[in-house]
Amino acid sequence: MQKYFISIFLIVTISSGWSQSSDTLLVAFWNLQNLFDTIDDPIKDDEEFLSSSELEWNEERLEKKMFNMSRVIRLMNNGNGPDILGVCEVEHQSVLDSMVQKYLSDLNYKTAYIESPDNRGIDNGLVYKADKFKLLNIQADTIHLSSGYPTRLIFGVNLLTMNNEKITVFVNHWPSRRGGQDESEQHRIMAALTLRNAVDRIFNTDPDSKIFIIGDFNDEPHNISLSESLRAQRIICDSINTKPDTGFKNELFNLSFEAHEKGDGSYKYQDNWNMLDQIIVSGSLIIENNFYYLCKSFEVYKPELIVTRSGKYKGAPYPTYGGKNYLAGFSDHFPVIAKFVWTRQ
């Protein structure tokens, strides 16, 4: 794969005869680690998250988890919450709506969601600020695995900004590494190709499209699925006053690459950090002047309350369960965030 080292020069234009103001938008993604309701779904494998199970999942624990997750979401963006938040491992829209309505109602959030064919019933969803975005429509692309095993959909949401600009957000949770990274790699390659086809449909209509790709990819930025199949390219921010030419508009750039190469990660497996959760954007969000990525703002978000403070797993995310043991924590993944400057006219 060819690697691009792109220096970004951010420009703010001031013209007479009209006024404009800039706003910083925060885009985030978080794997919520089994945000399940307590009701038995007869067509899904959700028995593990019932009161009768070994985990003893019940309403009290569900409420505690929703409260915990909401505390972290509210902390993002200087206490204002993210403007766009993608989530995965949610059983039904009702439980996501319940969390938003009970604990985040003052932030003017709405949700977009679609049920996936995943056997466990864990889905992708989107939370967005209704005062900044209007929902246009949702779409879904099915990943057809060679095994025939059903997996999460590629979930796409089209939003309209206050400037009447259309943006597309793809929320992902690609097939896991169960059976080993090498053995399962073909499944994530198929997910990447499915997503790339969806992206190319948009680019074929408008190469200037503003596309956000967020999710838990169960692969890292350098893996084949992301670097070759999806063709999400490396990007390095620095202070040199140059910009890529417009030929990059219909390309994808992985904002997570630099942090990954420095050894950062969103998920810890044994003693190794993995950058499984990432934010990828279309080239127009790199090179344009009115809506663009804020250099070096990508971050694995680690407020102290969600970090394990001692013991064998010190420094790792503090989860809801450690194995079968209830810890009353948050998630086994850290969220990832990135900021974008948006000029409103």
Image: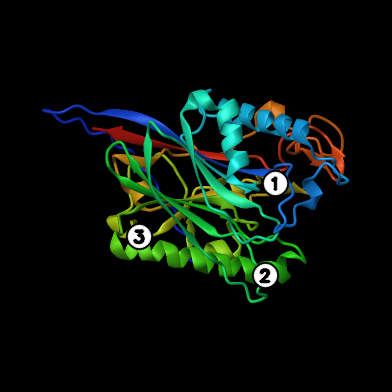
Is the residue 237 above or below the residue 59 in the image? Answer: below
The local crowd at label 2, few if under 14, some if 14 to 19, many if 20 or more residues have their Cα within 10 Å, is few
Find the distance from the CA under tag 2 to the CA under tag 1: 25 Å
- Asked whether residue 270 appears in the rendered view, the answer is no
**Is label 2 in contact with label 3 (beta carbons under 8 Å)?**
no
Residue 344 x/y as whole percent: 28, 32
Q: Say which amino acid is labelled 2.
A: Tyr
In this rendering, which labeled residue sits more in front, label 2 or label 1? 2
- Comes first in the chain, label 3 or label 1: 3
- Comes first in the chain, label 2 or label 1: 2
Residue 103 shown left or right of residue 16 in the figure: right
Residue 217 x/y as whole percent: 61, 56
Find residue 149 and name its label.
2
**Secondary structure at numbered mark 3:** loop
Q: Residue at x 30, y 36 (%)?
A: 162
Q: Nearer the viewer, residue 284 or 175?
A: 175
User: Which quadrant of the rendered structure holds the C terminus?
Assistant: top left
Residue on which disc 3 sits: 250
Q: Residue at x 75, y 52 (%)?
A: 46
Is the residue 292 above or below the residue 345 in the image? Answer: below
Residue on which disc 1 sits: 267
Q: Say which amino acid is labelled 1.
A: Tyr
Q: Nearer the viewer, residue 162 or 105?
A: 105
- Looking at the image, the residue that sits furthest to the bottom is 146
Q: Which quadrant of the figure has residue 151?
A: bottom right
Q: Residue at x 73, y 38 (%)?
A: 317
Q: Say which amino acid is labelled 3.
A: Asn
The local crowd at label 1, few if under 14, some if 14 to 19, many if 20 or more residues have their Cα within 10 Å, is many
- Comes first in the chain, label 2 or label 3: 2
Find residue 323 and name its label.
none
